[in-house]
Amino acid sequence: MSKPIVTAIASFGMSGVVYHGPSLKVLPQQFKIHKILERTKNISAERYPEATIVRSYEEILNDPEVELVIVNTPDYLHFDMARQAIEAGKHIILEKPFTKTSDNARELIALSKKKGVIMTVYQNRRLDNGFLTVKKILAEKLLGRLVEYEAHYDRYRNFIQEGSWKEDGDERTGVLFNLGSHIVDQALVLFGAPKAVTAHLNILRTGGRTTDNFDIRLHYGHFNAILRTSYLVRELGQQYILHGTEGSFTKMGSDPQEEMLKIHRHPNEPKWGEEPQSDWGLLNTSINGLHFQGKIETIPGNYTDFYVNLYKAIREGKELLVKPEEALTTIRILEACLESNRLKKTVEFLAE
């Protein structure tokens, strides 16, 4: 095996603590956590004593040992920080939603190709258990011809978190670019780019200043993908609802990985990501002329697979799980949602 990829984490907030750090930690043959940027604190020292805490981004950029930089800072910092790292010859992971504008995304893609570095976007929800199960059901055509797809990514957060960059800013700061980037990306993986987009964006929380609710329709000609998110859903319903000419599939519950990671469990544990049978989805369909109705065991997810793939892409030239061009398309669809909501009409989505 080749030597581990020397890695720096550009922020140690929620994503560094919950997502990136644990995945890197359980892959010591593939990744070496070399530096972690904490401007004032030393939170990472206990969990990652092997890493050096630095106080400035320049200490990462100027370190010739660093091969990979994880840019997991607030969205408005992504473009400049990624550009600097690429100019320094580093491979890059950017947190979703990549960049705030499609023009910025195109610029980074062109620059990464010019510099010969690999760039990807952390779309870990491609590795959620429910999505993996839906993907398999569709691949095996268990519902016949799909006529409707609906996905929810709901939360209950009825307060305004003062001081958070996610609660202030422009129209690209709210839940559309945050959680919306996940379920739009999932739809792109399943169905490709839509022909048109209809979006209704709302601010529902008392005192809210950024979008906290949306209803999106991605139009594919023969069916629509319906994507919904709200911060005011206290009683969660179905996460996925699929209807086809032969049957339906519905699934409640959310992937348990995030909650497991929050209590410091490790993603290399036995039975990682498995969920209780009560959360399994319900399939009601006809298969080869036979009626089937019952629970379908959920395929466990593992966010660490993102890093396994990235290692193979960097060291072995394998295909990336999340290509930057795909993340660009996600940004373009989110921009089309802004346009649709502003014009109060369906807008055409053109391929590049």
Image: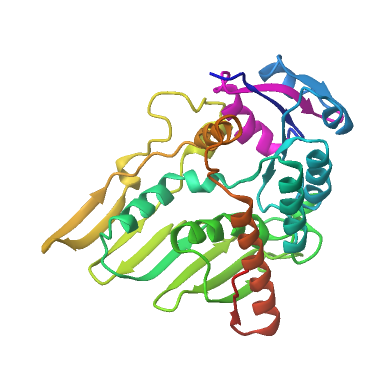
- Asked whether residue 233 is in view, the answer is no
- Quarter of image, res 118: top right
Question: Residue drawn 32% across and 47% down?
Answer: 280
User: Which residues lie in the magenta part?
Assistant: 13-40
Q: Looking at the image, which is closer to me, 228 or 30?
A: 30
The image position of residue 291, as x and y in percent, is: 13, 61
From the viewer's perspective, tell me whether residue 340 is left or right of residue 105: left
In the image, residue 20 lies in the stretch drawn in magenta? yes
Q: Seen from this angle, which residue lies furthest top?
A: 50
Q: Quadrant of residue 274?
A: top left
Residue 80: x %, y % from top left: 84, 48
Pick whichever, 38 or 331, lies toward us.
Answer: 331
Q: Residue at x 66, y 68 (%)?
A: 204
Q: Is residue 345 above or below residue 126?
A: below
Residue 238 on the magenta span: no
Left/right placement of residue 92 relative to residue 350 reads: right
Residue 179 rendering spot, x and y as whole percentages: 61, 55
Residue at 46% over, 45% down: 128
Residue 114 against residue 3 in the figure, above or below: below
Residue 334 screen position, x and y as percent: 64, 66
Q: Nearer the viewer, residue 264 or 309?
A: 309
State whether residue 103 appears in this view.
yes
Q: Hey, which quadrant is residue 335 in on the image?
A: bottom right
